[in-house]
Amino acid sequence: MNQTTNEPQGQTRGGRTGRLIAYGLIGIIAICLFFAPLLFPDVRSQEVAARICIFIVLVASYDLLIGYTGIVSFAHTMFFGLGAYATAIALKQMGPGWDAVIIGGALGVGVSVLLAALVGLLSLRVKAIFFAMVTLAAASVMAVLASQFSDFTGGEDGIIYKVPKIFSPATKLLTDENGKVLTIFGVKANGKMAAYYFVFFGSLILYFLMLRIVASPLGTVLEAIRENEMRAEALGYKVVLYRTAIFCIAAAIAACAGILRAVWLKYTGPETTLSFAIMIDILLMVVIGGMGTMTGAIIGATVMSVAQFYLKDLMQLASEATAGIPLVPDLLDPDRWLLWLGLLFILLVYFFPAGIVGTLARKGHHP
Amino acid sequence: MKSMTTLVERLGGINLLPVLLAIIALVLIGSPSTWLTLTIAGLSMGMMIFLMASGLSLVFGLMDVLNFGHSAFISFGAFIAASVLAALAVWVAADSVLLNLLALFAAISAAALFGLVAGWMFERVIIKPVYRDHLRQILITMGALIVAEQIILAIWGGSPVAVPRPNFLSGSLIMGDVTIEIYRLFAFGLGLVTYMALHAVLNRTRVGLLVRAGVENREMVEALGFRIDRLFIGVFAVGSALAAMGGAMWAGYETLITGAIGSEMMIIVFIVIIIGGLGSIEGSLLGALMVGLMGNYVAFLAPKMALASNMILMMAILLWRPYGLRPAVK
């Protein structure tokens, strides 16, 4: 992993126009997400909006590892899952209350950090490529354990539970003079809205925290390690400790994202938190948005989440249109959408390794 | 204490680890006949895992390329073997051992041939543009793995595929209390033959000498005028063929395979090459045997911990030897 990648320079030196476009896009996305309950009141769009918020955090925390420090981990869903499962189990066992969310969440974050420190110290001191393998193994072991210890985790079915009362749809968040739920632009200000804003502001705080980390001296050291590990070590920075530290931080943030996910969905199962498909989603989002840029996480997560919903519809049409030809309908089946995303992913890594944000930033640099 | 250490070294040093594992298991299990059945199952499983792991380990040792898509060859090997066996159902079910063998031979060689050709193409198209760039290697081979798994799902469908087992390999030998599945003995034998062939090629031939030299120090061999990159394509293709062969054997062992077979095995393969150390087939064999034995013993003692136990084994060995037991590259 000593190889220097040239995408970050594009971002730091980057051209004005491209960056303006990127920031414009982010502004639009931020406004849409902030007003999502009013702009897109239907259930499906709400799900997409909340998913985008959570995945922005998840992808940005993953980017701390892959983009800023240059280490590839496949255990990010493990920490995400730990956060979600700990919250879910606490809510199930202790009943719906804030104490359950706080205790469960704290436990999830604590276990994540501990596990991250263990894995990091064990495998980050040798070749970074070992780390990719060890994390992949650890994540799949965790997934298997979660499905086997079904007394706690509900196995493949997952856990359904109640969340604190303020988030239930029957709660009146704001009331008009008649004591009924206040409607703003035809949308009821009920508990669903409260849940959405809990997710939104939770994500926002975590995102700003990461922006702060990246801008701090720690962030600079991490970039130095990515660019030249030997030189960073020679300058007196303990590379293993820094790498382990950022791995723990990323794990903690992923676990926090897991808490948000658990509270939003009122359901936690392998499919929504631990599965390898989510890891692939995160990888795709990071690469699409642009590695080594915090802004890339926002664009990557949004583009992928929206595309996932519409690509499947599009493929359904294409599959029906080609029904007569052998094998083609099978390849275009909506269940095969990962195939096309995989191809897209390979092409992106070949031709646009800098992702959307990185490419935009460089475009202005070389007009 | 010192004489103890030299005694252990003389007996084989770390090569004794699987034996140690077996002895501990004997104490824990108690019943010798159960223990023997489990040990044979573990050894044959280890041999099949060795087939899958050795190629990956050599490829990494030679060119510093880690192929996350390696498991795609395992899955393709398994499914191709299943299809060939299904197509030759008459031979498979026949009473004649010769016809049985022919069908089996056809299935395994079809898988290996596919691995050879696909491995060569994979190297040219996917790996070549990203030599010496680990980050993009991991990403691109991961992307290739996703695509390959989806192609398997598109061709063979999502439901499990049954793998017919040749007549003479089904059933088991019964000696006293000990039952041994014949297929396991066969898998063990085939794995052992492959290992010995690989060992002979690497240690007795000129090509093997070059491969070993390349693992040791690539630049030096290149400076002496040898084309390591060409050698590498060969090793990659052979490694992929071995993986496909291992997949084919595994399909016969499991008798019911799903599209998830590749990713399931990949985790075990990774654990094996981390335990064994990258770049050496001896290390892969050692790691594979340990993982196979451990998996079977623990599956008997505490079924839920089977995969986790291998993970713990890996962690323990990483603590003890961060580069694995017998690494050829550091």
Image (spheres, rainbow, N blue to C red):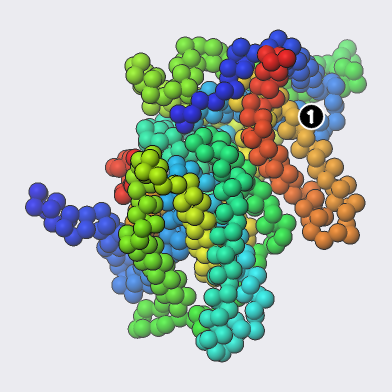
Give percent across and percent down for residue A9: 58, 17
Q: Which residue ends up furthest to the front in the rendered image?
A: B225
Quarter of the picture containing the C terminus of chain B is top left
Horizontally, residue A308 falls left or right of residue A7, namely right
In the image, what residue occupies the spot 82% across and 61% down? A326
Q: Residue furthest top?
A: A16
State whether residue A305 appears in this view. yes
Q: Secondary structure at mark 1?
A: helix
Q: Position of residue B290 (x, y in %)?
A: 36, 57
Frontmost residue, B319 versus A34: B319
Is residue A96 positioned above or below B282 on the image?
above
Q: Position of residue A346 (x, y in %)?
A: 65, 39
Question: Would you say A337 lies left or right of B280 here?
Answer: right
> What residue is rendered at 72% in x and 60% in y?
B155
Query: B58 or B71, which lies in front?
Result: B58
Mark 1 neighbour class, 10 Å CA radius: few under 14, some 14 to 19, many 20 or more: many
Report which residue position mark 1 lands on. Answer: A46
Q: Residue at x 45, y 47 (%)?
A: B227
Residue farthest bottom in this picture: B95
